[in-house]
Image (cartoon, grey):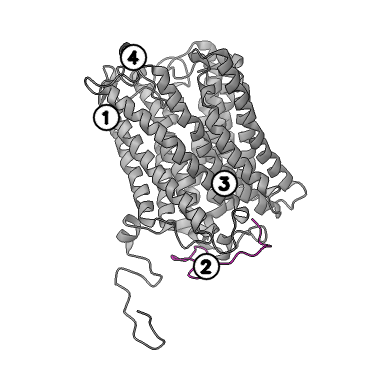
Amino acid sequence: MVALPGENTPAQPSSYDDDGKPGFFARWFYSTNHKDIGTLYLIFGIISGLIGGFLSFMMRMELAQPGIDVFANEHQYLVFVSMHGLIMIFFMVMPALIGGFGNWFVPIMIGAPDMAFPRMNNLSFWLLPTALICLLISFVVPGNANGNGFGGSWVMYPPLSTTGHPGPAFDFIIIGLLAAGFSSIFGAINFITTILNMRAPGMTMHKMPLFAWSVLVTAFLLLLALPVLAAALFMLFTDRIAGGTGFFDPARGGDPQMFQHLFWFFGHPEVYIMILPAFGIVSHIVSTFSKKPIFGYLGMAYAMVAIGVVGFVVWAHHMYTVGMDVDLKAYFLAATLVIAVPTGVKIFSWLATMWGGSIRFTIPMQWALAFIFLFVVGGVTGVMLANAGVDAYLHDTYYVVAHFHYVLSMGAVFGIFAGFYYWFGKMFGVMYNKWLAAAHFWLFFIGVNVIFFPQHFLGLNGMPRRYIDYPEEFEIWNAVSSMGAWITLAGVAFFFLMLIEALILNRKRVGDNYWGEGATTLEWTLSSPPPYHQFNTLPRIEDNDEH
């Protein structure tokens, strides 16, 4: 029914406010609005980050000095190691970067009123808390004869994950990871459909913002990689049940190495699934605070596509020590070196964007610059590990731990915080206290470097990972590393102080485009926060619009 001027229109249902928002319960539990679902993902990511961060803090306290002081036994320590990895990857980084910022800003950036499948979007989110509960249950149910929980690491290699943990703890983890996998697959289908079919008039693929490009490539990676993990987990599950299959059991004609191939065929693209959205965020921040369009826009977009493609053909560099043929090692070595090329394109484009720009060292820019620095450090150590000869020495040492934490704990997480501070005012309509935010940045930056940089030295000296105890010659660097955990904890405390001050105490309102002329994407044309239903009339993208 069309309401004519002066005609009595039906009143809005009482459960809705003047902006069309449903009541509290319907809004947050039944929500199909992409912005609210994005907020839920961010809240979930923060909660998961606190759980995963607590696990890592306890690990560092145990390793502060030789001997077993914090945990009851080695199994309990290994449970913490395993759960830390699984929670941080599947329940903190991915929900925050892809689910949180992706849901919030991809539809707005491409001029769409919402995601293509809003109900599927709701389902994608609510599968995640269910999955996390399954993982947390695994803590308190029997794992093996040594105690509760699963201590087979996040890589879940058989036979340790099959005959080595006969209790139900690992079964709960499999169920949780399958639920999280379905969540990500549904989300990927939604993003691909939304980006390919719902762009505003005039927005061609080559005019699309780089963050939308990064989420599109990430969604294809999820769609191609996660079913392989799901298949591997299902095969593990059938191997574990009484009288089950023998996919990974050599005594029954199987091969545990097959699981490694399946896992890393997922596991290496997963690295790029976690980092590509951060690339997109950093691109926007560098452009905004240099007051210049991103240098080499098409090169940046297709570099992400290249990273996505090549990321699928390098997986076995995680497996140099399992007895691979020399020619096969040579192939994976070369392919791994090749992937550094598109990554280098991105690094140099960011530097070229800043060159000659009118740079403002705002809080988001500080996080973005730190991201570039830390990712380069992590990338260089990764290129070292690409060499099969070097890797034979450094494999499963703390050098590897330092490498991937520089890329993920300090790369992806710094990308999350960069995006959070960049869009904070846009999401919540208020501005944070820059001094509290600066304290958060500097304490976090110093803390994580103090944690992980010494671990390069521990690894080069031969300290193996996943051990609860170590000889006294490793004590100094472990003590330094554990001090870094306290500094990082102080940084996290300032983050929450910033949230309380901005969202509860001060509530300093911001304008539509509070970053000024450098911010050119569509979200800056809307109010802060954006209306509950944006773009009643679709925007039209002109030829001279910047990316």
> Does 221 sit left or right of 32 as displayed?
right
| Above or below, 493 relative to 516 | above
- Residue 23, picture quadrant: bottom left
Q: Are marks 4 and 3 in contact (CB under 8 Å)?
A: no
Residue 436 visible: no
Mark 2, Cα crowd under 10 Å, few <14 / some 14-19 / many 20+, is some
Q: Position of residue 333 (x, y in %)?
A: 60, 22
Question: In this rendering, which labeled residue sits more in front, label 1 or label 4?
Answer: 4
Question: In this rendering, which labeled residue sits more in front, label 2 or label 3?
Answer: 2
In the image, is residue 374 part of the stretch drawn in magenta? no
Residue under numbered circle 4: 253
Residue under numbered circle 1: 140
Q: CA distance from mark 1 to mark 4?
A: 34 Å
Q: Are marks 1 and 3 in contact (CB under 8 Å)?
A: no
Residue under numbered circle 3: 418
Kind of residue at disc 1: Val
Q: Report helix, strand or loop for mark 4.
A: loop
Q: Report helix, strand or loop for mark 3.
A: helix
Mark 4, Cα crowd under 10 Å, few <14 / some 14-19 / many 20+, is few
> Does 148 sit left or right of 47 as displayed?
left
Q: Report helix, strand or loop for mark 1.
A: loop
Q: CA distance from mark 2 to mark 3?
A: 29 Å
| Above or below, 10 relative to 82 | below
Kind of residue at disc 3: Ala
Kind of residue at disc 4: Gly
Q: CA distance from mark 2 to mark 1?
A: 51 Å
**Nearer the N terminus, badge 2 or badge 1?**
1
| Above or below, 460 relative to 217 | above
Give, as a single range, the part of the protein colored magenta.
527-547
Residue 538: mark in rendering? 2
